[in-house]
Image: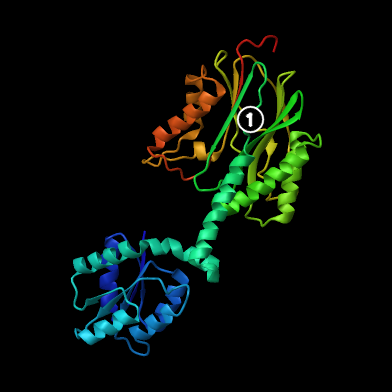
């Protein structure tokens, strides 16, 4: 919803315009003086300003000059509201920085049309403004070019950190996929060979999206790989990651993770869940379903958090599906969520597929459900399948 600040010293006009624009779907904030307007504009950073030129104490021209001198507000579009019909006043207003003008008394339909026209022409600036504030003096053509290059490089590095190929074992299929919602992701998954018979498997989701989440993802993955190779149990691995994040990051920065050790010889899976979406273990032959919830709290919030782990025997036709909330919390056009029940049904209906095909099938079903290829969150899936020919387990 676009936010508009209306500035006029005539209260009846303020109320008149506010009611009309709110009925047209805009968020409207009113101010009855130039001083009040400047304070609210600075605080709210609206998408557009409707500014009366003739006001006592501080007129619209002075307000415009102050807005254009401020880096945070200089690009907010302004439509002049004036009772003056002289050409010179209109020219002065436009030369001061206004984007359009409308003369009182005005028709409300014309006002809405002018507002929409200006917003359409300046909407891209709305999304550039945060970038300009963040980059400061570096916001130049060369600076933006370098930033784009750095983001592309970060995305390439992130892709290179994902497993190139899933590990190959007799009677066990393993596959994984990650589709970021932005250029870089806050999700990750990993397959970590511990020795000939043991494989570390992790899936994680960093809170937030984009570059901040990706930076924390790099950190968490590095700690994971260091700690898990020291022979720690899954519960100890999550405890070590949690303690580091709780000590070294802000309270609003956290991660969720499932880490487990697959024993490929005895066919067991020992895991711990740190506040993550519970993986699903199904067996189509016995119609059994289990959710892997043993563990503890999400990682990085509480330095006193403790974690437990559990060992599961794996049988012929067992399928383990790990996923992030980009799967189960995805919404369709009716604001219904995909949910674990739909995911479980997709797994049941496609149990004959190999691990890689099952990953793709879940992704296809999710895309069909949401009716869009554009994701609002990262999507990560890992599948482990035990072959139907396995004996004695």
Quadrant location of residue 241?
Answer: top right
Image height of 217 relative to 110, above or below: above
Front residue of 366 and 276: 366
Question: Which quadrant: the C terminus?
Answer: top right
Q: Which residue is mark 1?
A: 292
Q: Position of residue 109 (x, y in %)?
A: 19, 66
* Colouring scheme applied when the structure was drawn: rainbow
What is the secondary structure assignment of the residue under circle 1?
A: loop
Q: Position of residue 72 (x, y in %)?
A: 47, 72
Q: Is residue 273 left or right of residue 152?
A: right
Q: Is residue 361 left or right of residue 96?
A: right
Packing grade of label 1 (10 A; few <14, some 14-19, many >=20) is: many
Image height of 219 relative to 365, above or below: below
Point out the residue furthest to the front here.
Answer: 142
Tell me if residue 8 can be seen. Answer: no
Residue under the point 34% across and 83% down: 60
Q: Position of residue 212 (x, y in %)?
A: 59, 54
Q: Position of residue 296 (x, y in %)?
A: 69, 39
Quadrant location of residue 41?
Answer: bottom left
Question: Which quadrant: the N terminus?
Answer: bottom left
Q: Is residue 258 left or right of residue 343?
A: right
Quadrant location of residue 89?
Answer: bottom left
Point out the residue furthest to the right here.
Answer: 230
Front residue of 282 and 163: 163
Image height of 156 relative to 35, above or below: above
């Amino acid at each position: 919803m676009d936010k508009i600040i209306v500035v006029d010293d005539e209260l009846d006009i303020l109320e008149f315009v506010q009611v009309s624009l709110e009925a047209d779907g805009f968020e409207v904030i009113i101010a009855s003086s130039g001083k009040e307007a400047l304070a609210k504009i600075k605080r709210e950073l609206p998408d557009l300003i409707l500014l009366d030129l003739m006001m006592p104490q501080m007129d619209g021209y002075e307000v415009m000059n102050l807005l254009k001198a401020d880096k945070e507000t200089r690009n907010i579009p302004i439509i002049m509201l004036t009772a003056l019909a002289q050409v010179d006043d209109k020219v002065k207003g436009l030369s001061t920085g206004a984007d359009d003008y409308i003369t009182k008394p005005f028709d409300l339909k014309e006002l809405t049309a002018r507002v929409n026209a200006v917003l359409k022409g300046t909407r891209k600036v709305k999304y550039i403004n945060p970038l300009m504030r963040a980059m400061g003096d570096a916001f130049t053509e060369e600076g933006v070019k370098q930033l784009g290059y750095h983001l592309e490089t970060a995305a390439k590095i992130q892709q290179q950190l994902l497993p190139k190929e899933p590990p190959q074992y007799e009677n066990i299929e393993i596959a994984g996929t990650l589709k970021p919602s932005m250029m870089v992701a806050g999700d990750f998954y990993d397959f970590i060979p511990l020795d000939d018979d043991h494989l570390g498997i992790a899936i994680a989701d960093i809170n937030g999206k984009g570059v901040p989440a990706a930076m924390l993802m790099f950190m968490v993955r590095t700690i994971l790989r260091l700690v898990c190779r020291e022979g720690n149990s899954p519960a100890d691995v999550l405890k070590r990651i949690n303690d580091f994040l709780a000590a070294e990051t802000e309270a609003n920065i956290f991660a969720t993770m499932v880490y487990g050790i697959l024993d490929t010889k005895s066919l067991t899976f020992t895991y711990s869940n740190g506040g993550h979406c519970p993986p699903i273990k199904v067996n189509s032959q016995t119609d059994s379903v289990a959710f892997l919830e043993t563990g503890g709290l999400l990682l990085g919030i509480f330095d006193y958090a403790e974690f437990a782990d559990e060992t599961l025997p794996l049988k012929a036709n067992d399928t383990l599906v790990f996923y992030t909330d980009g799967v189960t919390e995805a919404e369709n056009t009716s604001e219904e969520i995909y949910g674990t029940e739909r995911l479980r049904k997709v797994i049941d209906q496609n149990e004959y597929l190999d691990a890689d095909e099952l990953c793709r099938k879940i992704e296809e079903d999710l895309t069909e459900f949401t009716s869009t290829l554009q994701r609002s969150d990262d999507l990560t899936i890992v599948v482990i399948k035990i072959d139907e020919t396995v004996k004695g387990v």
